[in-house]
Image (spheres, rainbow, N blue to C red):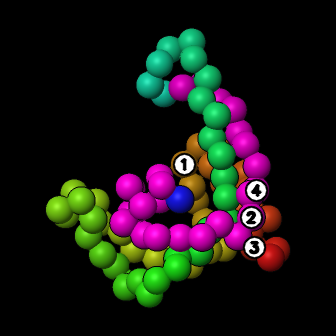
Amino acid sequence: MRELLEETGLKVRVVRELGVVEQPSWRVPSFRDENHFVHAVPTTPTREEWDHADGAIHCRWIPLAATTSVFAEHGVFLQAILRS
């Protein structure tokens, strides 16, 4: 919830935990990152598009589909969300 607020400005509630993926860190050589994935929904109304962090980040909603492209292994739990 904190990370989503920091990255997008959205306040959310977690619907459910989807899982954890451990992978090599992109920041620290020889370190492994643990990425926690959750299904979350906004708790307040949102616009279709918005700027966050004084315009440094432009956010927008996109349709979620089985063919949605996501970074690296971050799409591993996409099917779990689509089935719900």
What secondary structure is found at the residue carrying circle 3?
A: helix
What's the amino acid at mark 2? Arg
What's the amino acid at mark 3? Leu
Q: Are marks 2 and 3 in contact (CB under 8 Å)?
A: no
- Residue at image position (57%, 55%) is 70
User: Label 3 neighbourhood size at 10 Å, few (<14), some (14-19), many (20+)?
Assistant: few
- Residue at image position (57%, 17%) is 31
Q: CA distance from mark 2 to mark 3?
A: 13 Å
Q: Are marks 2 and 4 in contact (CB under 8 Å)?
A: yes
- Residue at image position (80%, 76%) is 84
37 relative to 34, above or below: below
Percent of width and height locating residue 2: 48, 55
Residue where numbered disc 2 is placed: 16
Residue where numbered disc 3 is placed: 82
61 relative to 67, above or below: below
What secondary structure is found at the residue carrying circle 2?
A: strand
Which label lies toward us, 2 or 3?
A: 2
Which label lies toward us, 4 or 1?
A: 4
Q: Which residues are magenta?
A: 2-25
**N-terminal-most mark, 3 or 1:** 1
Which label lies toward us, 3 or 4?
A: 4
| 13 in magenta | yes
What's the amino acid at mark 4? Leu
Mark number displayed over residue 18: 4
**N-terminal-most mark, 2 or 1:** 2
What secondary structure is found at the residue carrying circle 4?
A: strand
User: Label 1 neighbourhood size at 10 Å, few (<14), some (14-19), many (20+)?
Assistant: few
- Residue at image position (73%, 43%) is 20
Q: Is residue 30 left or right of residue 17?
A: left
